[in-house]
Amino acid sequence: MASILAVDDSASMRQMVSFTLKGAGYDVTEAKDGQEALNIAKSNKFNLVITDVNMPNMDGITLTKELRTLPAYKFIPILTLTTESSSEKKMAGKQAGATGWIVKPFNPDQLLATVKKVLG
């Protein structure tokens, strides 16, 4: 089954995302901010990254840019799961290399459908 890196500074949000994805059979690793996620990603290979935008140490937009510089993550889908819904933020995410954008609060069925779609 696919492995997913879930990045969010909110422990309860990480729990909800992880619970939803693990329930569908995915292997989920959690990170509390972009910097921790980048460190984990450099020594592990994931099939998908789901990241929040607003986090301490490194935000999700910067994380996306940093991941895209790594050869192993050049073509790995990166979904942004955030409360941010402005077109400026979405454009910044797209320019950084984000594959898709989901606005919180998320619907578990919508999240699973999106994950399934981007994983092919």
Image: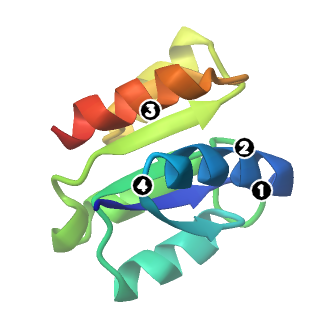
Which residue, given by chain and number where applicable, does mark 1 sit on? Answer: 9
Q: Which residue is mark 2?
A: 54
Looking at the image, is 56 positioned above or below residue 82? below
Report, in whole angstroms, how far the alpha carbon at label 3 lies from the one at label 1.
21 Å
Is residue 110 or residue 93 the one in the foreground? 110
Amino acid tagged 1: Asp
Foreground mark, 4 or 1, reads 4
Dot placed on the residue nearer the N-terminal end, 4 or 1: 1
The earlier-in-sequence mark between 4 and 3 is 4
Tell me whether circle 3 and circle 1 mark residues in contact (CB < 8 Å): no
Identity, as a three-letter code, of the amino acid under mark 4: Gly
Q: Quadrant of residue 32?
A: bottom right
Secondary structure found at label 2: loop
Q: Nearer the viewer, residue 106 or 93?
A: 106
The front one of 30 and 53 is 30
Say which of marks 2 and 1 sits in front: 1
Assess whether mark 3 and mark 2 are in contact (beta carbons under 8 angstroms): no
Nearer to us: label 2 or label 3: 3
Between 35 and 40, the one nearer to me in the picture: 40
Q: Is residue 76 visible?
A: yes
Kind of residue at badge 2: Asn
Mark 2–mark 1 CB contact (< 8 Å): yes
- Colouring rule applied to residues: rainbow
Q: Who comes first in sequence, dot 3 or dot 1? A: 1
- Numbered disc 1: secondary structure: loop
Q: CA distance from mark 2 to mark 4?
A: 28 Å
Name the outermost residue toward the bottom. 43
Q: Residue at x 49, y 48 (%)?
A: 50
